[in-house]
Amino acid sequence: MSKKIGIMGGTFNPIHFGHLLLAETAHDQFGLDQVLIMPTKNTYYKQMNNLVSEQDRVTMVELAIADNPNFVLSKLELDRDGTTYTVETLRQLTTAHPDNKYYFIMGADSLFHIESWYEPAEILRMANILVAGRGSSGEGSLLTSQIAYLNDKYDASIYLLNSPNMEISSHNIRKRVYNGDSIRYLLPREVADYISRKGLYGRRDTED
């Protein structure tokens, strides 16, 4: 039986309410059967530092999505050796479940850079793209133009998500922890408690 599966990848270092709201919006707006929350391992454009382990990031995701049956942790990319490419993830998923339809969830910044990704035409062929806008109406106009350009060039299926704008970033959360500032209301309490209990982000790091 065919299912509509969302994919939301990221370092999730740490996962926060911005991630969760975007995934929930995609689920509701497009009637997805489930959303795979997929921590990345290594990407070709950004290397993870070693200040937080893969298991820490997995545990924080598990804590964040435990009360939402529509979200499922996927370790597909973590379990694969070598550099992570989105196109290989989609190939693996479509080979295992060829009847499913896949919806890749991303922010506007990623959509503007997607042509620099490995095999972008294949990504846009295998998955619908659900993109969240951010910021001013001017930026919204640029995003609309980018969607039209990619849809036309690649015969892609790219759709805009009606997600509320939440200016939360993992980088800012890590910085606040390092500086001893509160991170309450930025991420689930269970994740904040885990960060405190494990003493994560006690040293400043530079990953975006």
Image (cartoon, rainbow, N blue to C red):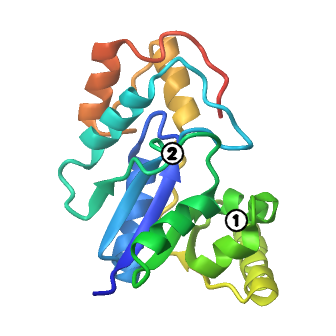
Q: CA distance from mark 1 to mark 2?
A: 24 Å
Q: Quadrant of residue 146?
A: bottom right
Residue type for callout 2:
Arg
Residue at the spot x=58%, y=69% of the render? Answer: 131
In the rendered image, the vertical position of residue 127 relative to residue 175, given as above or below: below
Task: Tell me the SS state at disc 2.
Answer: loop
In the rendered image, the vertical position of residue 106 relative to residue 11, given as above or below: below
In the rendered image, the vertical position of residue 198 relative to residue 169, given as above or below: above
Q: Depth check: 95 or 18 in front?
A: 95
Residue type for callout 1:
Leu
Asked if the residue under mark 2 is in contact with the one under mark 1, i.e. CB atoms within 8 Å, the reply is no
Residue at the spot x=76%, y=84% of the render? Answer: 154
Q: How many numbered circles does the render carry?
A: 2
Residue 31, horizontal then vertical, whole percent? 34, 82
- Nearer to us: label 1 or label 2: 2
Q: Which residue is mark 1?
A: 111
Residue 74, horizontal then vertical, whole percent? 37, 52
Task: Tell me the SS state at disc 1.
Answer: helix
Q: Quadrant of the C terminus?
A: top right
Q: Classify mark 2: residues with Cα within 10 Å, few (<14), some (14-19) or many (20+).
A: some
Disc 1 or 2, which lies upstream in sequence? Answer: 2
Residue 45, horizontal then vertical, whole percent? 74, 42
Residue 185 appears in view: no
Residue 136 appears in view: yes
Q: Quadrant of residue 135?
A: bottom right
Q: Quadrant of the N terminus?
A: bottom left
Residue 13, horizontal then vertical, whole percent? 49, 34
Residue at the spot x=67%, y=32% of the render? Answer: 47
Q: Depth check: 157 or 79 in front?
A: 79
Residue at the spot x=61%, y=47% of the render? Answer: 84
Q: Quadrant of residue 182?
A: top left
Question: Which label sits on residue 80?
Answer: 2
